[in-house]
Image (cartoon, rainbow, N blue to C red):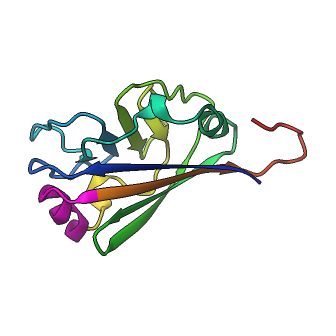
């Protein structure tokens, strides 16, 4: 098993609605309009470009997976997504998890089993009051003996 972890923190904002049906996003930006229905936290200490090279290499490996654990107050949720060779992970401020296979420079995971709308409403209410969000990212894939080691 090839595995790498990343940690980040972000915080809530009064305009968080988290009702988007196909994505969720965490951003380094500090401001949020009501139009940002996929954004669940702002002021992150990392965007896609800030992730380690090793972490990004693992997520770009065919068959990789991403396990994301979100913790806010007493609430915790674990999200399962897939990596993809098409991930560039070069956006300076944003991280986006998608239910679809679409990738762009902000995408960190595809085929995610959660979107903004699926997250526990109690957690979203805390984030809308400015609570802190702790995020643990685990990228991994099973090394089938190829000798590849990013």
**Front-most of 149 and 120?**
149
Q: Kindly report the secondary structure that dominates the magenta region of the rendered protein.
A: helix
Start-end of magenta stretch: 121-132
For the point 59% across and 34% down, which residue is it? 56
89 within the magenta span: no
Left/right of residue 133 with respect to residue 30 in the rendered view: right
Percent x, y of residue 30: 19, 37
Percent x, y of residue 102: 46, 33
Q: Quadrant of the C terminus?
A: top right
Percent x, y of residue 64: 66, 45
For the point 30% across and 75% down, which residue is it? 74
Is 77 rendered above or below residue 55?
below
Is 81 rendered above or below residue 83?
below
Q: Is residue 103 visible?
A: no
Left/right of residue 29 with respect to residue 34 in the rendered view: right
Q: Quadrant of the N terminus?
A: bottom right
In terms of image quadrants, where is residue 84? top right
Left/right of residue 110 with respect to residue 71 in the rendered view: right
Is 74 rendered above or below residue 10?
below
In terms of image quadrants, where is residue 133? bottom left
Percent x, y of residue 116: 29, 53
């Amino acid at each position: 098993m090839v595995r790498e972890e990343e940690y980040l923190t972000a915080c809530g904002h009064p305009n968080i609605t988290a009702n988007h049906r196909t994505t969720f996003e965490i951003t380094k930006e500090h401001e949020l309009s009501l139009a940002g229905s996929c954004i669940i936290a702002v002021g992150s200490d990392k965007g896609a470009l800030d992730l380690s090279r090793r972490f990004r290499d693992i997520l770009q490996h065919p068959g990789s997976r991403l396990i994301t654990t979100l913790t806010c107050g007493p609430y915790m949720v674990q999200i399962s997504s897939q990596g993809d060779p098409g991930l560039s992970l070069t956006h300076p401020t944003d991280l986006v998890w998608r239910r679809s296979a679409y990738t762009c420079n902000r995408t960190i995971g595809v085929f995610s089993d959660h979107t903004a709308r699926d997250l526990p409403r109690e957690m979203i209410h805390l984030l809308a009051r400015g609570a802190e969000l702790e995020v643990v990212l685990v990228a991994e894939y099973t090394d089938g003996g190829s000798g590849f080691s990013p």
